[in-house]
Each structure stands twice: as structure tokens, then as C-alpha cells.
Image: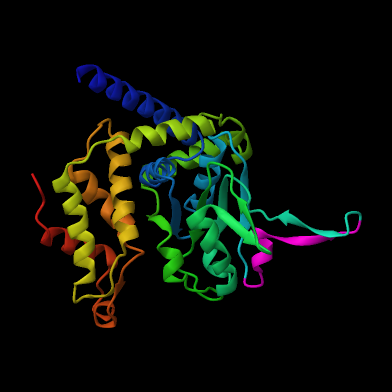
């Protein structure tokens, strides 16, 4: 038992060493935004897609590009627009005269890390094209199923301010995102550091300094370590109680699904590993709950008019559930 404990501890140390190297590489370009970077790394360990929301210019797209750069995998970027068609995302069958048959030409979604900029600018039919690939890591075209390579993660951004020409994401698609990360402005000193760094080097020069840290095999290995992080039955009940409360709360029009419970479980395990532990504590669950739930619940119109936010309601729900000790 002691040998197993020692082995698990060594694996957690190795995982943290790799994540610290990733942070250091990303830190060569991005100053601050530590929570956004850590949540992206958590999503990577959980095999979860991530939605990033923030005003323009706060490094949403840049952070996604850097996460892809530190991993030795293929990267694709899609700029969603109102005239984009599903075939522009997943690909289409093209007639090959030499073979007298149709041949499938994969779209840009056939990469390992897919960055979708301004995901809420595409219409419903294009949004629907992402449903299968985000949930099942495969695309079905003309009756044939095409599997995605490992790993496959969608990192999507959206702007909460400019709503002209945008489409609200379907609830079914929002539920497929592990996290919704809300990104704010940098602190004053961080902004001074940003200006100082860019005074001497261009962004392209900074990006060229970023090195690969993880391989696909390493990601698979570290995900297995995260799965082995232990969680007590009373903490599993705590997760279930939080999510269950969202379905019975008079302030909410829509509560969270069982997929949210699974997401909160995975995120809590990954957070424990990121913090150097091989077991989950209540604080891991409480810290992850807003990021997992904020895009999965809908406030009643009355509460929205009163100015209540999703995060404030989640905080009230967590306080109403007894924390196991």
C-alpha cells in the first residue's frame, strides 16, 4: 500500500512538473491571466472542450494558440461568420473524375486542437455541425463515419459585448463545453509588464521562443493519472447535491444536466492533481463549480431583471448545500 501511495505521489509530481513547464512557456508571451491558463490546462487533462468569453484584446485567442503550440499536435483555427456553412467546418464529398466516385475532403475541424473564433457568429445549422464531433469525436458524412485523432479539443471564444450579427449558442452545444471561462482585464502592473515586454520584442518573436512540452502520449498518460485521483463517496454526493439543487431552484428556468455532474467530477480531480494532491477536497469542487455550471443554467426572467447573475446564483446554491468534512 505504501509503495502504491509513493508511486501515485511521484506521478502527481511528474504531472505538476510538466504543467509548470507549460505555464513557463505560455508565460513567455502572456503576462497574467493565470486562471484562464490553468483552466485550459485542466480542460486538457479532462478531455473537455472550453468556451472562453471576454472583451476583445484580453488574449483569449492568443492563449488558445499557445496551448496548442506547447503540445506537439496539429492546430486549426476557424473564424466563424454568418455565411459559414456546415461543410466549411466538417468537410464535404468531392467528385473525383479519375476514380468516377466521390471522395471525402476533410474540413479544418480534422485537427487535434481546434480554435473557433467568435463561435456565436455562425447560424444554427453551422452550430449543429459541431454537435457530433464535440460529443463523440467523430463526423458522419454521406453515411460514413470519420474518427478524430487523439487528442481532440475545441477551444471557442466569444465576445459578450458586441451582439450585433451574433446567434445565441444552443443549450445542447453549451452543455458540451466542460468550462465557460470569463476573462477580465489585466491588473495595472500586469499591463505595464505587457507594454515593457512588447517594447523590445514583437509578438512573432515571442511566439517563436515557445517550445513543445507535451506529446499526445504524454497527454494520454497524464489523463490516466487524473482518473486515478481518489474522491470520497460523500464528496460525490456533494457534487450530485449541487447539480440537483440547480434543477429545483425557483430562481432558475433551466438547471444543469447529468453531464454537468460528470464535468464537475472530472474537473475536481484534475484540479486536485494540479494542486499536487492525489485526492479531492471540497474546495476543489467549490472552486470548479462556477466554471462548470455558469453556461448550463438559465435564470428566470424575473431574476435577470433584478440583476442576479449566474455566478451569484451558483454561489447561493453552494452555500445552501452542506459541505462534507
Q: Nearer the viewer, residue 168 or 226?
A: 226
| Quadrant of the image occupied by residue 106 | bottom right
Residue 168 vertical position relative to residue 317 in the rendered view, above or below: below
- Side of 218 where 273 appears, left or right: left
- Side of 193 where 149 appears, left or right: right
Q: Nearer the viewer, residue 321 or 192?
A: 321
Give the residue displayed 62% in from the left and 41% down from the top: 74
Instruction: Give the total number of marks visible in the rendering.
Output: 0
Residue 133 % position (x, y) = 55, 57
| Quadrant of the image occupied by residue 300 | bottom left
- Side of 126 where 4 appears, left or right: left
Residue 185 % position (x, y) = 40, 53
Q: Quadrant of the N terminus?
A: top left
Q: Is residue 190 visible?
A: yes
User: Is 84 included in the stretch rendered in magenta?
Assistant: yes
Give the residue displayed 42% in from the left and 57% down from the top: 177
Magenta residue span: 82-97
Q: Quadrant of the C terminus?
A: top left
Give the residue displayed 68% in from the left and 56% down from the top: 107
Give the residue displayed 75% in from the left and 61% down from the top: 93
User: Is 121 included in the stretch rendered in magenta?
Assistant: no
| Quadrant of the image occupied by residue 10 | top left
Q: Is residue 156 visible?
A: no
Q: Nearer the viewer, residue 316 or 87?
A: 87
Residue 105 vertical position relative to residue 122 in the rendered view, above or below: above
Residue extending furthest toward the right: 98
- Side of 217 where 17 appears, left or right: left
Residue 208 % position (x, y) = 62, 33
Q: How is the image coloured?
A: rainbow
Residue 176 % position (x, y) = 43, 59
Amino acid at each position: 500500500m505504501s509503495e502504491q501511495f509513493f508511486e501515485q505521489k511521484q506521478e502527481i509530481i511528474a504531472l505538476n512538473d510538466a504543467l509548470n513547464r507549460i505555464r513557463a512557456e505560455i508565460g513567455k508571451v502572456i503576462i497574467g491571466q493565470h486562471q484562464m491558463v490553468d483552466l485550459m490546462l485542466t480542460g486538457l487533462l479532462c478531455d473537455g472542450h472550453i468556451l472562453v468569453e471576454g472583451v476583445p484584446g484580453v488574449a483569449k485567442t492568443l492563449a488558445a494558440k499557445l496551448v496548442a503550440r506547447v503540445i506537439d499536435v496539429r492546430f486549426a483555427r476557424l473564424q466563424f461568420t454568418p455565411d459559414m456553412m456546415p461543410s466549411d467546418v466538417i468537410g464535404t464529398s468531392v467528385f473525383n473524375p479519375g476514380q468516377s466516385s466521390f471522395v471525402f475532403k476533410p474540413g479544418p475541424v480534422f485537427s487535434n486542437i481546434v480554435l473557433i473564433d467568435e463561435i456565436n457568429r455562425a447560424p444554427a445549422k453551422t452550430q449543429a455541425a459541431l454537435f457530433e464531433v464535440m460529443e463523440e469525436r467523430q463526423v458522419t458524412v454521406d453515411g460514413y463515419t470519420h474518427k478524430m485523432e487523439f487528442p481532440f479539443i475545441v477551444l471557442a471564444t466569444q465576445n459578450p459585448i458586441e451582439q450585433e450579427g451574433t446567434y445565441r449558442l444552443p443549450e445542447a452545444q453549451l452543455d458540451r463545453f466542460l468550462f465557460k471561462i470569463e476573462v477580465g482585464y489585466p491588473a495595472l502592473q500586469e499591463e505595464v509588464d505587457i507594454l515593457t515586454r512588447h517594447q523590445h520584442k514583437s509578438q512573432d518573436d515571442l511566439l517563436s521562443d515557445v517550445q513543445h512540452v507535451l506529446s499526445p502520449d504524454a497527454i494520454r498518460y497524464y489523463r490516466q493519472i487524473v482518473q486515478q485521483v481518489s474522491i470520497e463517496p460523500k464528496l460525490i454526493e456533494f457534487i450530485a447535491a449541487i447539480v440537483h439543487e440547480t434543477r429545483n431552484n425557483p430562481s432558475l428556468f433551466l438547471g444543469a444536466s447529468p453531464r454537468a455532474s460528470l464535468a464537475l467530477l472530472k474537473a475536481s480531480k484534475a484540479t486536485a492533481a494540479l494542486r499536487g494532491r492525489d485526492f479531492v477536497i471540497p474546495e476543489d469542487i467549490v472552486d470548479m463549480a462556477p466554471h462548470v455550471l455558469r453556461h448550463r443554467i438559465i435564470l428566470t426572467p424575473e431574476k435577470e431583471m433584478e440583476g442576479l447573475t449566474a455566478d451569484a446564483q451558483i454561489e447561493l446554491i453552494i452555500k445552501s448545500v452542506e459541505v462534507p468534512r
